């Protein structure tokens, strides 16, 4: 793992999670969450964000997948906060539009230090396979609160719920990749007139 990396362990009565993250990776990923569709989405984030991700979670999926998905978002946000450190020299902002056949989504992120999720996605079905589509919101919400990021997630069009969700996670990965890339013109300074992020 690179210098811009982190390992986070988060244990509660509902989940036991370990996240290993490298911001300067090659898109390699390993997951063991017992939630296959969620792992498929996390793989998109790693691949399109060029992140190395290793996430294990032993959660109370006998109840449902909610705690696992939300808590992985929390732990991943914590890992980003550690790996980014003082955020000096990063681009800070990232955005991406991603299509998948008829579906199109836009994600914009700002590692601003101010957590906020602005999520505009409507789904006609409640599930893709056994995965509750509302859990995507819970993942992103957990992430922004602990990465201290502002995140706009918008599904612009589409009718296949799998396609719509996949465009969200791919765009999220690509927006992250843009935002965490070191900008040499910043000469190691934060991308803020306040002098700190």
Image (cartoon, grey):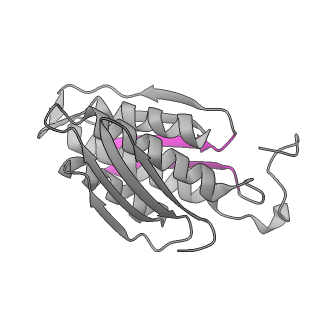
Measured as percent of width and height from the top left, residue 54 is found at 38, 63
Total labels drawn: 0
Say left or right for 116 vs 47: right
Residue 97 appears anywhere in the view:
no
Image quarter of the C terminus: top right
Say left or right for 195 vs 110: right
Measured as percent of width and height from the top left, residue 89 is found at 77, 60
Residue 104 is one of the magenta-drawn residues: yes
Residue at (61, 32) in percent of width and height: 115
Say left or right for 157 vs 27: left
**Type of secondary structure dominating the magenta stretch:** strand
Residue at (82, 63) in percent of width and height: 188
In the depicted structure, whether residue 125 falls above or below residue 8: above
Question: Where, by quadrant of the figure, is residue 84 drawn?
Answer: bottom right
In the depicted structure, whether residue 180 falls above or below residue 95: below
Measured as percent of width and height from the top left, residue 167 is found at 35, 47
Say left or right for 118 vs 101: right
Measured as percent of width and height from the top left, residue 180 is found at 63, 58
Residue 123 is one of the magenta-drawn residues: no
Residue at (61, 58) in percent of width and height: 83
For the residue pair 141 and 68, the one nearer the viewer reads as 68
Residue 35 appears anywhere in the view:
yes
- Range drawn in magenta: 91-112
Residue at (21, 48) in percent of width and height: 37
């Amino acid at each position: 793992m690179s210098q811009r990396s982190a390992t986070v362990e988060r244990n509660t009565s509902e989940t036991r999670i370990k996240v290993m993250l490298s911001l300067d990776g090659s898109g390699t990923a390993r997951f063991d969450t017992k939630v296959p569709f969620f792992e498929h989405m996390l793989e998109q984030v790693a691949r399109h964000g060029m992140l190395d991700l290793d996430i294990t979670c032993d959660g109370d999926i006998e109840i449902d997948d909610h705690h696992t998905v939300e808590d992985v978002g929390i732990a991943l946000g914590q890992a980003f906060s550690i790996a980014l450190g003082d955020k000096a020299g990063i681009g800070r902002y990232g955005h991406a539009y991603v299509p998948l056949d008829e579906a199109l989504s836009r994600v914009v992120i700002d590692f601003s230090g101010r957590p906020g999720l602005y999520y505009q996605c409507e789904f006609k079905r409640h599930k893709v396979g056994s995965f509750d589509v509302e859990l995507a919101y819970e993942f992103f919400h957990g992430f922004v609160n602990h990465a201290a990021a502002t995140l706009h997630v918008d599904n612009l069009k589409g009718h296949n719920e799998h396609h719509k969700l996949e465009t969200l996670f791919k765009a999220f990965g690509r927006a992250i990749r843009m935002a965490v890339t070191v900008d040499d013109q910043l000469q190691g300074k934060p991308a803020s007139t306040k002098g700190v992020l």
